[in-house]
Amino acid sequence: FSTYRMYVTRHILPELGKLRLGRLSPQHVIMLVNHKTAEGLKPRSVRQIRAILRRALGQAVKLDLLARNVAQHVDPPKVPYAEIRPLTPEQARVFL
């Protein structure tokens, strides 16, 4: 909960908080994603911000506050794949 609150208060509300729900568009979400990426946030964090926004807007759709979830139409940033390299037998012996 505290992590979600941090993402909302630090990242989502400053960017989108002044917009009326009905005026929110996919372009606003794209600008949010691009701005957070340009600020230097890691792709996984930007992806989490978009996911939180998408879930919140999904609730607004269920409550008939919105006709559609505009965040669903925005692709999340790609998270680079990091290959895991297991320890060699020698490294494992040193570690143990």
Image (spheres, grey):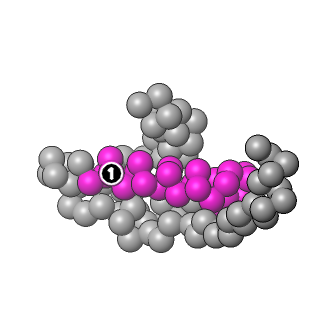
Instruction: Give the secondary structure at mark 1.
Output: helix
Does any portion of residue 28 appear in the rendered image?
no
Q: Residue at x 15, y 47 (%)?
A: 63
Q: Which residue is mark 1?
A: 55
Q: Residue furthest top?
A: 2
Residue 33 placement, left or right of 40: left
Tell whether position 13 is magenta: no
Check the image and report above or below for 61 versus 26: above
Identified by mark 1, the residue type is: Arg
Q: Which residues are magenta?
A: 34-58
Residue placed most toward the observer, 23 or 51: 51
Q: Residue at x 71, y 63 (%)?
A: 86
Check the image and report above or below for 43 versus 13: below
Check the image and report above or below for 63 versus 50: above
How many numbered badges does the structure rendering display? 1
Q: Residue at x 41, y 48 (%)?
A: 52
Location of residue 80 (image quadrant): bottom right
Location of residue 26 (image quadrant): bottom left
The image quadrant where one finds the N terminus is top left
Residue 16 placement, left or right of 24: right
Q: Residue at x 39, y 61 (%)?
A: 71
Tell whether position 56 is magenta: yes
Does any portion of residue 8 appear in the rendered image?
yes
The dominant secondary structure in magenta is: helix
Tell me residue 42's x, y (percent): 67, 54
The image quadrant where one finds the C terminus is top right
Residue placed most toward the observer, 10 or 96: 96
Query: Badge 1, how many Cα within 10 Å: few under 14, some, many 20+?
Result: some
Tell me residue 75's x, y (percent): 47, 71
Tell me residue 31's x, y (percent): 57, 61
